[in-house]
Image (tube, rainbow, N blue to C red):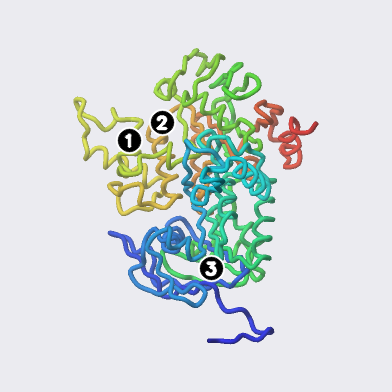
């Protein structure tokens, strides 16, 4: 037994060394090591495909390493299932959320520890405990609300709240703020600080490098499955992290799509009635324009775009595309009218995970890869390989099953599908959610190119810096209504937030 003096540093909570994981054609982890102290917030940075998600899956018992050793609290740690990981005190909040949509928020939070009274589930206790834990993450939701009715951002906050219901020694947060607005992000970072003060160790994974430098004590950088360095966050700047992540210097962000001068109205939406929102919504998008959509979680941004795309039934309104009135009752109608939609929920709504990258990309334009009504697989592979290369999808080939890719590369496949379809209007909801700094620039460049080519682009994002850097105009939602339509000269973070809160202030 080792005795530690009061002045000695605490022994590590987690020690991982020499971790190797090999998939067919991919060496996902190549001798990676990681040391995390109790009460430490430890950042894990790297491009998509660097190995971060694979390491998290090993920690969570979802897969096992091929070699290497892990110790938790000094004891050998070899979880063979998520249950074993949980029992050891490790809680994972995955980038791809896994809630039960037909159950309530309270049931999801306490599913494996439902409070009982006289042998029956104690509903009042669920409501009481759920209300308390949701308050910790700043989420105002009814405990009886169905998970399937929540936005991705709301589900993300519920998942984080769920981690707080356990007696966890180590919590892993994988892209926890990807869909959160600045106030919600600030609240989450406060929760992380409170956890560390209680002695809980946190592994924090984010492509928002400013967050990592702000909240973390130490930062470990992975690149191509290998450990590059572990350094104190206070000794690093964003440029240092980028250099270690990509192995080179990156040019400054393109702040505006040069050459994209908006032309005539391409999309005209008038009095679109969206289920659950207080009133109809009207807006326009011009040729060559990137329209940003801002607002807090639950403000109606995604709900409006889903209704426009026909994914949810609209209660009325008029939609015109290039001056022609169209009736949209389903996504099929929207695609036929020239409207594409890259959803924020790529796992459940954007991809068919057991199918190949090629099949997912060609899905919206089957005629391009068919001959006499039959799929021409060689043509499909050739054409999707071209668009995959343009999107820089990191995969052995387009035959690779899309479910085996990292979250960021899955997002690239979603966008590649609509690039392949070549629609006149593209709606992208949280386009860089879970995307690394290098790939983010590539996506911004792609959206700018589409605008320059005369397409209409709608970007829904919780990242105000993203919207103000990329868009020609920004409309702001507050409590289901558009409360502002701002030209680029009027872009200001404080102004946008003030409008976003307008309907929430009595």
Q: CA distance from mark 1 to mark 3?
A: 37 Å
- Residue found at x 39% / y 49%: 393
Residue farthest toward the front in the current orientation of the protein: 118
- Between disc 1 and disc 3, whose residue precedes? 3
- Between disc 3 and disc 2, whose residue precedes? 3
Picture coordinates of residue 142, whole percent (x, y): 63, 36
Q: Is residue 477 above or below residue 314?
A: below
Asked if one can make out residue 374 in the rendered structure from this viewpoint, the answer is yes
Picture coordinates of residue 360, whole percent (x, y): 34, 39
Give the labeled residue for mark 3.
220
Residue 371, by quadrant, is: top left
Q: Is residue 227 above or below residue 493?
A: below
Q: Is residue 60 left or right of residue 258?
A: left
- Residue found at x 21% / y 25%: 373
Give the labeled residue for mark 1.
362
Give the labeled residue for mark 2.
422
Query: At numbered mark 3, what does the secondary structure look like: helix, strand or loop?
Result: strand
Query: At numbered mark 1, what does the secondary structure look like: helix, strand or loop?
Result: helix
Picture coordinates of residue 447, whole percent (x, y): 51, 38
Residue 303's mark? none
């Amino acid at each position: 037994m080792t005795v530690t003096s009061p002045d000695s540093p605490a022994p590590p909570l987690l020690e991982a060394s020499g971790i190797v994981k090999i998939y067919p054609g991919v060496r996902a982890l190549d001798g990676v090591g990681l040391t995390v102290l109790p009460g430490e917030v430890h950042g894990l940075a790297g491009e998509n495909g660097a190995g971060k998600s694979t390491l998290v899956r090993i920690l969570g018992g979802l897969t096992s390493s091929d070699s290497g050793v892990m110790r938790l609290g000094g004891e050998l740690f070899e979880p063979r299932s998520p249950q074993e990981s949980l029992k050891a005190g490790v809680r994972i909040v995955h980038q791809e959320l896994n809630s039960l949509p037909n159950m309530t928020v309270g049931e999801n939070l306490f599913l494996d520890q439902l409070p009982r009274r006289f042998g029956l589930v104690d509903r009042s206790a669920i409501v009481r405990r759920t209300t308390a834990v949701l308050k910790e993450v700043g989420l105002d939701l009814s405990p009886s609300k169905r998970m399937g009715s929540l936005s991705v951002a709301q589900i993300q906050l519920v998942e984080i709240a769920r981690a707080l219901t356990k007696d966890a020694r180590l919590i892993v947060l994988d892209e926890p703020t990807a869909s959160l607005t600045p106030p919600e992000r600030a609240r989450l970072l406060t929760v992380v600080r409170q956890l560390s003060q209680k002695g809980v160790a946190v592994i924090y994974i984010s492509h928002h490098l400013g967050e990592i430098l702000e909240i973390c004590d130490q930062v470990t950088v992975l690149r191509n499955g290998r450990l590059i360095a572990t350094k104190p966050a206070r000794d690093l700047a964003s440029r240092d992290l980028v250099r270690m992540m990509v192995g080179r210097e990156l040019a400054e962000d393109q702040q505006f799509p040069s050459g994209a001068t908006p032309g005539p109205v391409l999309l005209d939406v008038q009095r679109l009635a969206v289920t659950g929102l207080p009133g109809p919504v009207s807006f326009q998008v011009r040729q060559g324009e990137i329209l940003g959509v801002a607002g807090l979680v639950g403000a109606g941004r995604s709900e409006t775009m889903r209704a426009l795309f026909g994914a949810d039934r609209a209660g009325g309104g008029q939609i015109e595309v290039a001056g022609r009135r169209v009736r949209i009752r389903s996504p099929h109608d929207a695609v036929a009218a020239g409207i594409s939609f890259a959803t924020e929920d790529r796992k459940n709504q954007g991809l068919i995970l057991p199918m190949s990258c090629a099949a997912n990309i060609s899905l919206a334009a089957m005629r391009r890869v068919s001959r006499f009504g039959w799929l021409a697989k060689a043509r499909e592979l050739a054409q999707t390989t071209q668009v995959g290369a343009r999107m820089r999808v990191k995969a052995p080939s387009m035959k690779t099953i899309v479910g085996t890719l990292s979250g960021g590369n899955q997002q690239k496949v979603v966008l590649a599908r609509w690039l392949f379809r070549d629609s006149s209007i593209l709606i992208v909801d949280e386009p860089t959610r879970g995307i690394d700094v290098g790939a983010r620039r590539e996506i911004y460049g792609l959206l700018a190119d589409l605008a320059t080519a005369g397409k209409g682009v709608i970007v829904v994002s919780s990242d105000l810096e993203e919207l103000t850097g990329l868009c020609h105009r920004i409309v702001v939602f507050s409590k289901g209504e558009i409360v502002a339509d701002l030209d680029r000269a009027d872009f200001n973070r404080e102004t946008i937030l003030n409008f976003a809160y307008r309907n929430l202030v009595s």
